[in-house]
Amino acid sequence: MAKFENGIIDFDKNDIENAWLNSPGLVNRDEKDYKMCYICKFHMIKTNFNNAELGSFGWIVDLINLKKLDLNSNNFIAIHPWCIEYKKKTDNRSILKKVKSQLWVFNEN
Ligand SMILES: [Zn+2]
C-alpha cells in the first residue's frame, strides 16, 4: 500500500505492479513485457521502470485521478516520465477508459 509522506508518494512493489496492469496493452505484444502509454500511445518496456532517459521507453507510476489523493491501486497507472506534463486534465479516468476500449497494435516499422 502506497504511503504519502512529506509530499512524496511512496509506492510499494504491489502498487508498481498494479500500475503496470492498469495501463493499456498491445495486442501483438506480451503484456508482461510491453504496455502502452495512454498519453502518447507509444510503448513502455517493463524492465525499464524508473528510467527517465528519452528513447528508453521507461515508465513510472502516476495517479489517474489527481483531484483527490486516492492511494488505491486502481488509481495507479504506468506512464512515460516525460508524458506527465502532456496530460490535459487532472482527472484522466475517461481518457484512459476510452483508450482501453480500443485495440492497440505495436508498430514493427
Ligand atoms: Zn508516453
Image (cartoon, rainbow, N blue to C red):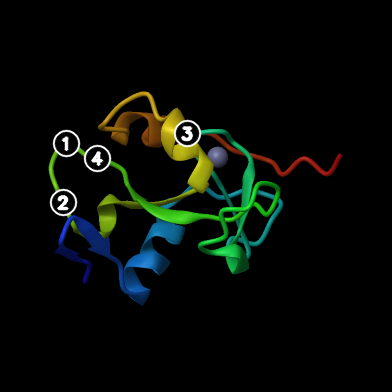
Asked if labels 4 and 1 touch by Cβ distance under 8 angstroms, the answer is yes
Q: Residue at x 37, y 24 (%)?
A: 88
Q: Residues within 10 Å of mark 4 (few under 14, many from 20)?
A: some
The secondary element bearing badge 2 is classed as: loop
- Residue identified by numbered label 4: 65
Of marks 3 and 2, the one in the foreground: 2
Q: Earlier in the sequence, mark 3 or mark 2?
A: 2
Q: Quadrant of ligand 1?
A: top right
Asked if labels 2 and 4 touch by Cβ distance under 8 angstroms, the answer is yes
- Residue identified by numbered label 3: 99
Q: Nearer the viewer, residue 6 or 74?
A: 6
What amino acid type should be assigned to the residue bearing mark 4?
Answer: Asn
What amino acid type should be assigned to the residue bearing mark 2?
Answer: Asp
Asked if labels 2 and 1 touch by Cβ distance under 8 angstroms, the answer is no
Which residue is outermost to the right?
A: 109
The secondary element bearing badge 1 is classed as: loop
- Residue identified by numbered label 2: 70
Q: Earlier in the sequence, mark 1 or mark 3?
A: 1
Left or right: residue 89 versus residue 26 is: left
Quadrant in the picture for residue 4: bottom left
Q: Earlier in the sequence, mark 3 or mark 4?
A: 4
Q: Residues within 10 Å of mark 3 (few under 14, many from 20)?
A: some
Separation of marks 4 and 2 at Cα, in angstroms: 8 Å
Q: Residues within 10 Å of mark 2 (few under 14, many from 20)?
A: some
Which residue is outermost to the top?
A: 88
Mark identifier at residue 67: 1
The secondary element bearing badge 3 is classed as: helix
Q: Residue at x 32, y 33 (%)?
A: 92
Which residue is outermost to the bottom?
A: 13
Q: Is residue 94 visible?
A: yes
Separation of marks 3 and 4 at Cα, in angstroms: 15 Å
